[in-house]
Amino acid sequence: MKMKNSNFGSYAVPPTLQKLIRLKEEWGGHDPFYTGLNFYLELSSFRYFNTPCDVVVFGNNGGDGIHYGFLTDFGTVDHLEHAPVVCVSPMDFDRPTKIIANDIKEFLSLLLTDEELFYNVFATEEDYRAAKQRWKEEAAVSPYGPTEEEQQQREDIRRTLRERVSLPHVENPYRHLELLARQRQERIAAGTQDLLGVVSSLAEDEVHVPYYVHKDERLDIEELKVYMVSAPAISKKALIRDIQMNFILRDEDELCKIVIQALTSLDLIDEVKRIAEGE
């Protein structure tokens, strides 16, 4: 299945996501799907200014703009079925994006048990377990909890999902997400402020040349133009990540042009289209 929109670009819809789309229709649409899985499928143009341009969005959780997507690492992932899944929390300006699963099946497995790890930060595993227990106790006495009918629908939907999609078992979700973060840091060749980094490799004669930007500091546009022409590809990609995290490109015409020109020079046309649609 191919989606004809700039979000998916040249990628086909992966098999597991196709199953979710079919299940949504079987279950009766957006609302029952959300009742069962706590997120909405979002396959077209759901993006925030700090959604990385190499992320293919596939869902949002209905709160604070939080959304989920496949990280393509600037188009180097062959198939979205095996792409890392990220959570983008656009209101978390210091670190809006983090890797939360190795692939979509692992994402679904974690979603059914420890979804809170996607968009919350806990100092320790003990803090997380204490928070889960507190939330459970609060939910038990809350007058705003699901009705018996909604709870039954939720259980039915989750059972059907497990029957249709073979989900891996994650022994310790908290430690697993910590492991994912460490593994990512070991792979990156150029660091970025959001800690996603860039995993492309440098050519033999290339050296990564970082270029620092910050939302509270004035940009030298002319200097930036020169850098984007002369810097190695990996350095351009790293800077583009930092620019997207720090600046709202729709409010920065010159900066947006520089980013688009840099992406075009790297033949990253899908990423260009996502930025254009997001703006």
Image (spheres, helix red, strand yellow):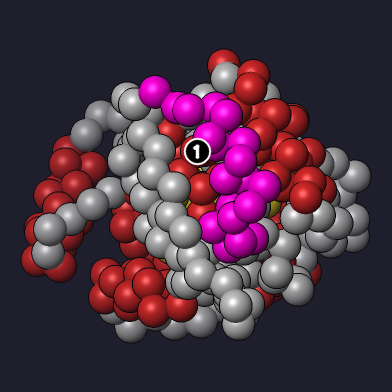
- The foreground one among 113 and 278 is 278
Q: Is residue 94 visible?
A: yes
* Residue 6 lies in quadrant: top right
Magenta stretch holds residue 151: no
Q: Quadrant of the C terminus?
A: top right
Within 10 Å of disc 1 (Cα), the crowding (few <14, some 14-19, many 20+) is many
Q: Which residue is mark 1?
A: 243
Residue 124 falls left or right of residue 222: left
Q: For the residue marked with disc 1, what is the amino acid?
A: Ile
- The foreground one among 168 and 228 is 228
Q: Is residue 169 above or below residue 243?
A: below
Q: Is residue 6 above or below residue 126?
A: above
Q: Residue at the spot x=18%, y=55% of the render?
A: 122
Q: Is residue 22 visible?
A: no
Residue 152: image location, x then y, percent: 48, 52
Residue 161: image location, x then y, percent: 61, 66
Q: Residue at the spot x=72%, y=47% of the render?
A: 263
Magenta stretch holds residue 236: yes
Residue 149: image location, x then y, percent: 49, 42
- The foreground one among 235 and 141 is 235
* Residue 203 lies in quadrant: bottom right
| Tally of numbered tags | 1
Residue 145 falls left or right of residue 241: left
Bounds of the magenta segment: 218-237
Helix, strand or loop: magenta stretch:
helix
Q: Residue at the spot x=32%, y=25% of the render?
A: 216
Q: Residue at the spot x=57%, y=20% of the render?
A: 252
Residue 267: image location, x then y, percent: 81, 54
- The foreground one among 223 and 123 is 223
Q: Quadrant of the N terminus?
A: bottom right
Mark 1 element type: helix
Residue 22 falls left or right of residue 256: right
